[in-house]
Image (cartoon, grey):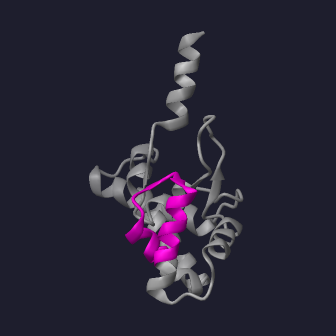
Amino acid sequence: MADTNQHIYPRSILNLFGLAAQKQLIDSTPTSTPLRPFNMETVMGKVSEFRIRDLSEEYKHLASVFIGLTNHLAQMPILEKALITALSKIIKENNIKSTYQEIITELIRIGVLYVYNYHKKDAQLRYHTPDLYLWGLNLRRGGPGAYQDLIKKKLKR
């Protein structure tokens, strides 16, 4: 629920709990059962969409970038070269005055992107986005990546 700067947005937390509670009430008979994690997971996409909408309103100059990322990317993490290609298309399509590097820098500053620190020896620079934005941008997490490599190392011991 945090962005890359470890900021947690109260509105997103309230949306998560509120939507999950509504889903639980619809899916089951009202009881004093605690909120189920499953219901929180199923509404995370909607919470993410709300957060992207909020960002689009707060940073109006990036609204077309958010839409463009949705249209030009499929998953995260992404190689720097692929991100630059997508941003270059977005800039051209929307007559944006900023460069791709300025956009990347701003997305990092506001917590939407971060440099993905997992690297194999031959890996290129990659970027990732937190789950808080992933689903709202209609992106999927590519995997299993680092997790699978870590498991393989543990099994070799």
- Left or right: residue 38 versus residue 28 is right
> Visible in this render: residue 129?
no
Along the line of sight, the residue nearer the viewer: 106 or 124: 124
Residue 56 location (% of width, % of height)? 53, 80
Name the magenta segment's main secondary structure.
Answer: helix
Say which residue appears at 57% left-offset and 76% top-offset.
55
Kindly identify the residue that appears in the image at 55 percent across and 66 percent down: 84
The picture places residue 61, in percent across and down from the top left corner, at: 58, 86
Between 153 and 16, the residue placed more toward the observer is 153
Task: Farthest residue to the top: give it.
Answer: 157
The part of the image, by quadrant, that contains residue 98 is bottom right
Tell whether position 138 is magenta. no
**Residue 4, quarter of the rendered image:** bottom right
Residue 139 vertical position relative to residue 117 in the rendered view, above or below: below
- The number of callouts visible is 0
User: Between residues 114 and 32, which one lies in front from this camera angle?
Assistant: 114
Q: Quadrant of the C terminus?
A: top right
Write down the region rendered in magenta. 66-89
Residue in the image at 53% along x and 54% along y: 79
Question: Quick one: 79 or 129, which is closer to the camera?
Answer: 79
Camera sees residue 39: yes
Q: Position of residue 142 (x, y in %)?
A: 44, 46
Magenta region includes residue 81: yes
Q: Position of residue 91 (x, y in %)?
A: 52, 81
Please say if 127 is above or below 154: below
- Please state, as top left, top right, bottom left or bottom right, where the N terminus lies in the image: bottom right
Say which residue appears at 71% left-offset and 68% top-offset.
109
